[in-house]
Amino acid sequence: MPILPPASPRPSASLAGLRLIETLDTHANSCAIMSDNVGLSTPRGSGTSGYVQRNLAHIRPRDQAAPYPKDLDSLRHRQRQPDKGILEHDRKRQIEVKVFELRDKLEDDEVDEEEIDRRCDELRQKLIAEAEAGKKSGGPRKTFKEHQVHEMADAKIKESERLRKALKISSDYEEGSHWKRQEERLRTALDREPDAKE
């Protein structure tokens, strides 16, 4: 192994210049560890690996220009309207599921195909008639699953209508109309006062 000569000091550097170079070297090393001044200068004693990652829990501030609509009509509650096509499809599907269960049971019992068709048609007609009668009467309160949003909306509309009729609220009632009438009465009373003074 070759013998290297001892490292020579920096040529003709004054003591102040030497300190400045050492300071810059130390700062450059700490910046390299910190990864562009992000994170810790050294992970020692911090209980972390020093790995820097972005904060995924940070919520950016919302646009403060116009957070809410200005017109009051858009703020009023609007009843969600159910899709009649989806409701009808679900009713028909429930009927067909029951018919299919009967068909499956009869096929397992090895009943003749014509007899199976006849019984299935009878059951289908019976279930359709019950569904039509059930629509008119309303029936008992039903619990819905979370995904049955159209059924829930339809039931809510029917419940609101029953409540409106029970409380004898007119169908053309507008929310806050009582206060509007109060304001109109007050205005007419104020308009009459100057006329009475003259």
Image (tube, rainbow, N blue to C red):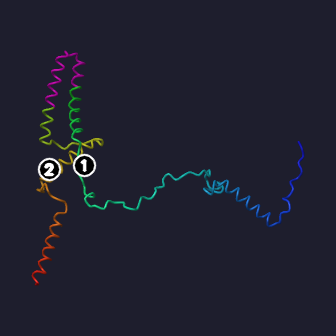
Quadrant of image for the C terminus: bottom left
What residue is drawn where x is 13% and y is 73%? 188
Q: Which of disc 1 and disc 2 is earlier in sequence?
A: 1
Mark number, residue 162: 2
Residue 33, position as x, y percentages in the image: 67, 53
Q: Along the line of sight, which residue is nearer the eye, 104 or 171?
A: 171
CA separation in Å, label 2 and label 1: 17 Å
The amino acid sitting under disc 1 is Arg
Residues shaded magenta: 101-127
Residue 105, position as x, y percentages in the image: 23, 22
Tell me the SS state at disc 1: loop
Mark number, residue 80: 1
**Is residue 39 in the magenta section?**
no
Tell me if residue 130 comes above or below residue 11 in the rendering: above
What residue is drawn where x is 77% and y is 61%? 21
Crowd band around label 2 with a 10 angstrom C-alpha radius: few (<14), some (14–19), many (20+): few
